[in-house]
Image (cartoon, rainbow, N blue to C red):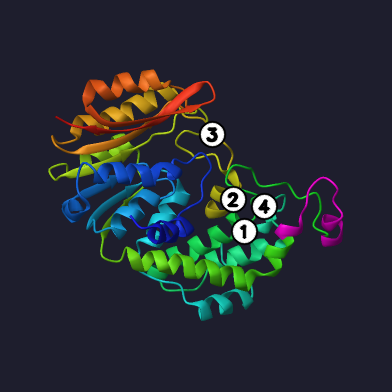
């Protein structure tokens, strides 16, 4: 895989904290040692907990013709619909949208009204103009994703929460002794340039994956598995979350609240993290055909690496193992083969 391709897809993917996206290039390199890249067009890739969508994007850009993308998180589903939807962004239309009056829609609450602790009014208004843009239905996902990426750029990094605004007065923000709000304000005032740059990044990725046939789902893995065709040669990504809080309702409140157009409370899973993780992994590995492969991740949630390893090896044979020491915990990924 070329560095230029990886660069294109990283600039288009959904930025997430705690993501295994940094390991995806190594996973694909290891898999290429098992199944040569020249044979990938004959694969079906099932990315069942897609997250950032980086793995799906890279497989599709390297010739895989059939991809299934699934995640229960609204932001990941939007990402998949946008990047695999085949519609690109028009820079002239973006400039017209952000200069237009804010849309007045029935049942629409201006985002600033519930997100003002984190977003200034100009930032929230641009999100609304893009997310509720009056464009044809097939184009809505990509403009909505552009709006989401616009907002996510105001977080300091993927590992930090959005900072709470102490005031909306720019003069006072510039004088704040506890935080440097300069990057936030500079981005706010460069909206047109920022959005044009994002549009270029997203369009470049969309063109690279245009040859793939992609299905997008938003379902619990255990519900989805019986609906899929498991008769082909498959490569499956399964990485159910195991942190105990918001396991299936990803706890990035601001992003999901903006997409839902209301402030969403955090919620807890009705089952234990151990049950959720184990049942999801088992649902996949029981159905995996002989000769097919799955990539799994474990050790950084409620279950230890050893607990994950016991379940994996009971149902499939590890062919590549890549543990990583993270503090006192062993975490990492493995590629399993069904035999």
Taking 144 as reference, is 166 above or below it?
above
| Residue bearing the label numbered 4 | 115
Per the image, label 1 sits on a secondary structure element best described as loop
| Residue bearing the label numbered 1 | 109
Label 1, residues with CA under 10 Å away: few <14, some 14-19, many ≥20: some
| Residue bearing the label numbered 3 | 267
* Residue 268 spot, x, y in % from top left: 51, 30
Taking 263 as reference, is 127 above or below it?
below
Query: Which contiguous range is marked in magenta?
Result: 170-184
Q: Nearer the viewer, mark 4 or mark 2?
A: 4
Q: Which quarter of the figure has residue 99?
A: bottom right
* Residue 202 spot, x, y in % from top left: 45, 65
State the CA–CA distance, disc 4 to disc 1: 11 Å
State the CA–CA distance, disc 2 to disc 3: 15 Å
Q: Are marks 1 and 3 in contact (CB under 8 Å)?
A: no
State the CA–CA distance, disc 1 to disc 3: 22 Å
The label on residue 262 is 2
State the CA–CA distance, disc 4 to disc 2: 9 Å
* Residue 191 spot, x, y in % from top left: 64, 69
């Amino acid at each position: 895989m070329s560095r230029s391709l990886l660069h294109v897809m990283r600039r288009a993917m959904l930025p997430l904290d705690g993501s295994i996206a940094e390991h995806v290039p190594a996973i694909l390199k290891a898999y290429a040692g098992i199944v040569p890249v020249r044979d990938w067009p004959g694969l079906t890739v099932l990315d069942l907990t897609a997250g950032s969508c980086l793995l799906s994007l890279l497989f599709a850009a390297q010739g895989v013709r059939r991809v299934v993308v699934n995640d229960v998180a609204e932001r990941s589903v939007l990402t998949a619909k946008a990047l695999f939807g085949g519609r690109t962004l028009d820079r002239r239309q973006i400039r017209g949208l952000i200069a237009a009056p804010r849309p007045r829609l029935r049942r629409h609450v201006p985002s600033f009204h519930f997100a003002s602790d984190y977003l200034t009014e100009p930032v929230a208004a641009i999100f609304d103009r893009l997310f509720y843009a009056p464009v044809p239905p097939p184009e809505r996902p990509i403009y909505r994703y552009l709006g989401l990426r616009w907002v996510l750029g105001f977080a300091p990094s993927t590992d930090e929460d959005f900072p709470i605004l102490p005031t909306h007065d720019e003069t006072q923000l510039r004088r704040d002794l506890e935080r440097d709000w300069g990057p936030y304000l500079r981005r706010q005032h460069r909206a047109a340039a920022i959005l044009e740059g994002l549009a270029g990044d997203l369009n470049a990725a969309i063109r690279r994956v245009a040859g793939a046939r992609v299905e997008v789902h938003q379902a619990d893995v255990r519900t989805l598995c019986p609906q899929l065709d498991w008769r082909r040669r498959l490569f499956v990504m399964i990485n159910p979350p195991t942190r105990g809080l918001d396991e299936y309702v990803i706890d990035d409140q601001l992003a999901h609240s903006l997409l839902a157009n209301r402030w969403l409370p955090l919620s807890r899973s009705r089952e234990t993290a151990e049950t959720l993780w184990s049942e999801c992994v088992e649902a996949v590995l029981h159905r995996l055909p002989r000769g097919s492969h799955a990539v799994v991740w474990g050790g950084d949630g409620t279950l230890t690496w050893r607990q994950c390893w016991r379940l994996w090896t009971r149902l499939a044979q590890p062919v590549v193992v890549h543990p990583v020491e993270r503090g006192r915990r062993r975490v990492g990924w493995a590629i399993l083969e069904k035999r």
